[in-house]
Image (cartoon, rainbow, N blue to C red):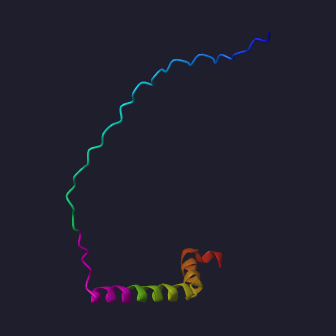
């Protein structure tokens, strides 16, 4: 006679619960709303500042275009003794 083979499953491992981790409970922070206002300067002041900046830019450009070699030559001549001539 043939014997029936029965398969026995392996034993289930015991359940080990993980330690509980404490999760901090955040408390809402209440802040007072602040209202900020921006004070815009008078437009005539801005126009005057812009005009002055524009004028200064033009003056700097003119100074850069001037040939300073003659003034430099005169300055060097005044510093060098006349014996060198």
Q: Is residue 44 above or below residue 79?
A: below
Corner quadrant of residue 25: top left
Nearer to me, 47 or 52: 47
Q: Is residue 69 left or right of residue 14?
A: right
Residue drawn at point x = 42 percent, y = 88 percent: 54
Q: Is residue 51 left or right of residue 34?
A: right
Task: Estimate the x, y position of residue 82 in percent, counting from the top left.
Answer: 59, 78
Residue drawn at point x = 80 percent, y = 9 percent: 1
Residue drawn at point x = 28 percent, y = 90 percent: 44
Corner quadrant of residue 70: bottom right
Task: Estimate the x, y position of residue 53 in percent, counting from the top left.
Answer: 40, 84
Task: Estimate the x, y position of residue 20 in percent, counting from the top left.
Answer: 39, 27
Q: Is residue 54 above or below residue 21?
A: below
Q: Is residue 79 left or right of residue 25?
A: right
Nearer to me, 51 or 24: 24
- Look at the image and say whether residue 42 sits in the magenta stretch: yes
In the displayed orientation, state which residue is furthest to the front. 1
Task: Estimate the x, y position of residue 13 in percent, counting from the top left.
Answer: 55, 18
Q: Is residue 39 above or below residue 8?
A: below
In the displayed orientation, state which residue is furthest to the right. 1
Residue drawn at point x = 33 percent, y = 37 percent: 24
Q: Which quadrant is home to the C terminus? A: bottom right
Corner quadrant of residue 83: bottom right
Q: Which residues are magenta?
A: 36-52
Nearer to me, 52 or 11: 11
In the displayed orientation, state which residue is furthest to the top. 1
């Amino acid at each position: 006679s043939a014997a029936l083979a029965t398969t026995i499953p392996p034993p289930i491992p015991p359940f080990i619960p993980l330690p509980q981790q404490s999760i901090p409970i955040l408390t809402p922070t209440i802040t007072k709303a602040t209202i900020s206002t921006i004070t815009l300067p008078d437009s005539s002041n801005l126009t005057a500042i812009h005009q002055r900046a524009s004028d200064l830019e033009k003056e700097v450009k003119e100074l850069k275009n001037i040939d300073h070699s003659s003034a430099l030559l005169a300055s060097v001549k005044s510093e060098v003794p006349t014996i060198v001539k």
